[in-house]
């Protein structure tokens, strides 16, 4: 049996993938410890999990979208968070003596600490920005990111030639498949296992769903609450005229949509994996979690990406034929309605989503990720 | 520029959006890199293959991309075009 130290970020899309993999490792008799902000991970992991606490930094969204958002993500969050977590991760490595460090791609402290202590480490790729080089057309942006990484490494005393904290040289696990990310020659130590899904608890009034109508989920995830109200108003106006055939479930605080049309249910949260088999389409901002969960259930999407990797995810979904992209800030209700009706009525979108679903099932998800991790850990012992 | 932007994004409200030279493509118009590629294709179709907006943007540093304005793009297009053709106008238009 092996010992794993997981280092990840207090963000749903990152942490939930790691929990799904950790549950699988634990079920196989391995020992798993965590290093991350206690305020987030203790409630998520429960009282019995081994947790080496770090402090935290709030993820404050500084800039709305595009390259400005990318810059602020690195400058205001990823780099400071790495700096902030690193001493605790170093202490956790020494105290726990793991066989393998499992580091989220953007929890850079995990890679830095493993490298410094001479431990093998694996990268978990939980979003779409760093796998397929979507910014290859903007080489100076990529160079700017590399400069941030180099400065951080220097500060941490980790300057080994060729050391890249974003990509482990041992094992990189990405929660997607080539059917979604695009076929390309990935290095041999990259494994694409498809999504590792974790149910989010949430009560749901199932009796409110009308089986005679088609069901559409509207969600902008957990990160974009500040931008959601205006989009939800336009989404409600888009689906209101479809009341005879479509019922929408909008996820978020009730004050986002104080007076929803009769065919829109505003709910604070949904049990996503239980609900998805009942859904005919999802309207979303294009977060990897939501998109992969929908595609895993063969549900087509209308995507209005806001920032970070969301435009990349949306482009992947469009290329695969499983959805339509609309502009988040500019899309008007009529255009949104047209896109929704298209993915609902044209069976090619659902067929494409099912093809991706098949690729996810074949890729193995969290159990496949656990198998790769336990092989690497066993080899390291 | 307004018509090229509307053609690239499919958003006709840009035609009456009161664009100025200082309007930022990303910060004010919420264009992303895919929109820029589409805008590049529209400008190339209208003003010739010498206009390579994607190549121009690729040469910008991160703050240059964030701050890229409508005026920057129109200046770039004008620089690409033979000087006797004058300011930014569709190529097929009589001189």
Image (cartoon, coloured by chain):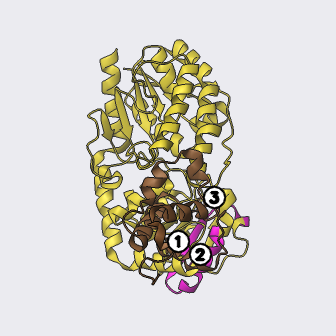
Q: Residues within 10 Å of mark 2 (few under 14, many from 20)?
A: some
Front label number (3 vs 1):
1
On the rendered image, what quadrant is the C terminus of chain A found in? top left
Q: Residue at x 47, y 81 (%)?
A: B95
Q: Residue at x 55, y 84 (%)?
A: A243
SS label for mark 1: helix
Q: Are marks 3 and 1 on the same chain?
A: yes
Which residue in the structure is indicated by mark 2? B14
Which residue in the structure is indicated by mark 1? B5
On the rendered image, what quadrant is the N terminus of chain A found in? top left
Q: Determine contact: label 1, label 2, CB under 8 Å.
A: yes
Q: Nearer the viewer, residue A272 or A128?
A: A128
Residue A315, percent from left and from top: 41, 60
Residue stretch in magenta: A231-255
Query: Sequence order check: which comes first, mark 1 or mark 2?
Result: 1
Q: Residues within 10 Å of mark 1 (few under 14, many from 20)?
A: many
Query: Sequence order check: which comes first, mark 3 or mark 1?
Result: 1
Question: In the figure, A116 relative to A255: above or below?
Answer: above
Q: Is residue A232 magenta?
A: yes
Q: Nearer the viewer, residue A208 or A115?
A: A115
- Tell me if I can see residue B13 in this picture: yes
Q: Residue at x 49, y 84 (%)?
A: A245
Which residue in the structure is indicated by mark 3? B27
Chain B tint as drawn: brown
Chain A tint as drawn: yellow
Q: Nearer the viewer, residue A29 or A193?
A: A193
Query: Sequence order check: which comes first, mark 2 or mark 3?
Result: 2
- Tell me if I can see residue A33 in this picture: no
Question: In the figure, A378 relative to A253: above or below?
Answer: above
- Determine the CA span between mark 3 and mark 1: 15 Å
Residue B29, percent from left and from top: 61, 65
């Amino acid at each position: 049996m092996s010992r794993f130290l997981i280092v990840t970020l207090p963000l749903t899309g990152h942490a939930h993938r790691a929990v799904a993999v950790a549950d699988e490792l634990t079920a196989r008799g391995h020992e798993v410890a965590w290093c991350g902000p206690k305020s987030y991970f203790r409630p998520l992991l429960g009282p019995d999990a081994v947790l080496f606490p770090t402090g935290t930094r709030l993820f404050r969204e500084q800039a709305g979208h595009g390259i400005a958002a990318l810059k602020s993500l690195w400058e205001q969050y990823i780099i400071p968070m790495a700096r902030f977590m690193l001493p605790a991760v170093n202490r956790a490595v020494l105290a726990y003596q793991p066989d393998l460090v499992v580091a989220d791609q953007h929890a850079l402290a995990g890679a830095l600490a493993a490298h410094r202590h001479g431990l093998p480490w694996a990268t978990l790729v939980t979003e779409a920005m760093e796998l397929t080089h979507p910014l290859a057309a903007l080489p100076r942006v990529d160079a700017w990111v590399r400069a941030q990484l180099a400065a951080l490494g220097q500060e941490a005393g980790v300057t080994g030639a060729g050391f890249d904290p974003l990509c482990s040289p041992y094992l990189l696990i990405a929660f997607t498949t080539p059917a979604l990310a695009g076929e390309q020659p990935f290095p041999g130590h990259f494994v694409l296992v498809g999504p590792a899904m974790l149910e989010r608890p949430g009560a749901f009034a199932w009796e409110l769903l009308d089986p005679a109508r088609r069901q559409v989920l509207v969600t902008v995830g957990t990160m974009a609450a500040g931008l959601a109200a205006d989009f939800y108003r336009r989404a409600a106006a888009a689906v209101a005229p479809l009341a005879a055939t479509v019922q929408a479930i909008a996820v978020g605080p009730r004050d986002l949509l104080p007076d929803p049309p009769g065919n829109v249910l505003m709910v604070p949260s949904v049990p996503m994996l239980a609900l998805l088999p009942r859904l005919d389409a999802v309207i979303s901002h294009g977060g990897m979690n939501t998109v992969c969960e929908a595609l895993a259930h063969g549900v087509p999407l209308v995507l209005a990406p806001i920032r970070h990797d969301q435009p990349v995810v949306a482009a992947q979904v469009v290329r695969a034929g499983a959805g339509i992209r609309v502009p988040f800030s500019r899309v008007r209700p009529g255009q949104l309605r047209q896109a929704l009706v298209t993915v609902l009525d044209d069976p090619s979108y659902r067929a494409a989503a099912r093809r991706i679903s098949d690729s996810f099932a074949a890729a193995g998800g969290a159990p496949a990720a656990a198998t790769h991790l336990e092989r690497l850990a066993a080899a390291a012992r | 520029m307004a018509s090229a932007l509307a053609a690239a994004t499919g958003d006709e409200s840009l035609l009456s959006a009161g664009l100025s030279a200082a309007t930022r493509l990303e910060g004010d118009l919420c264009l992303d890199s895919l929109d820029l590629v589409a805008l590049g294709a529209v400008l190339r179709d209208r003003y010739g293959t010498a206009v390579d907006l994607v190549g121009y943007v690729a040469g910008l540093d991160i703050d240059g991309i964030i701050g890229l304005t409508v005026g920057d793009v129109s200046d770039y297009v004008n620089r690409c075009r033979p000087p006797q053709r004058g300011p930014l106008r569709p190529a097929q238009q009589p001189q």
